[in-house]
Image (cartoon, rainbow, N blue to C red):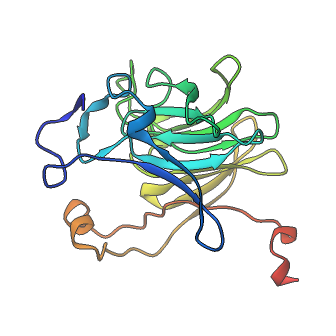
Amino acid sequence: MPGGVPDTEADGVLYADVLREVGPDGELLWEWRAIEHLPPEDYPLQPHYWREHWPLVNSVSELADGNIVASLRSVSAVIVIERATGNVLWRLGSDVVAQQHCVSELEDGKLLIFDNGTFRARESVTFSRVVEVDRATSEITWEYHDSTREAFFTPFMGSAQRLGNGNTMITESAFGRIFEITPDGRVCWEFVVPQFSRYHEPEAARVFPSESNALFRAYRYSAAELPWLR
């Protein structure tokens, strides 16, 4: 496997992702194996990344046309997978995104992406952003980052949700911050998780020994989406 930090495999093994769709009865409906469809030489691990996990799919969802969009963190890529064949129909690479998360399709077919920004190409300032990307052109059509760019950054996790009012709710995961912005980038609401605790899982505790208020992701739901509360 090209790229990555030497001798950082998991007990000498580099694991590749498998996506599976499972029915309510446990029946396997669809399966996609990264190693069968992604040539490693075209999807190398970024040089700084540990070699234990490739390509590290951190979000996956179905598009309106039935195909699948997936975010590949350890190679800094977003791909669209053809459900029928498993082939990659579209790719956004590390020249645009860096260690990204939480890719979702908007009503107009564009993709909303939380772009973490760790080891972003051609940038010396580390910052996170949220972008809209037009799949027809692979161009960024809307972008949010803090006016002081380094003031908004999470090196891992993170999410963005487009709300019904046109605003965007963002999770700055590493610092426990959830905030909402208007289309022109004005912060109109925010919440910072006040509870701090340590990771209980031993391996995670070794990597993150201090107390943290980090959270993975947040969503806002309308009353219509929570019928059991009526």
Q: Nearer the viewer, residue 28 or 90?
A: 28
Measuring from the top left, give residue 14's x and y in whole percent.
24, 46
Instruction: Give the quadrant of the N terminus.
Output: top left
Tell me where residue 73 sits by quadrant: top left
Q: Quadrant of the C terminus?
A: bottom right
* Residue 121 located left or right of residue 176: left
Closer-to-camera residue (121/85): 85
Question: Going by the picture, which residue comes out furthest to the left?
Answer: 7
Q: Is residue 97 above or below residue 22?
A: above
Q: Is 49 left, or right, of 60 in this rendering?
A: left
x and y percent of residue 210 in the render?
Answer: 26, 67
The residue at the point 77 percent across, 51 percent down is 163
Q: Is residue 176 left or right of residue 85?
A: left
Say above or below: 19 vs 45.
below
Residue 199 falls in image quadrant: bottom left
Toward the viewer: 101 or 195? Answer: 101
**Residue for point 47% across, 42% down:** 151
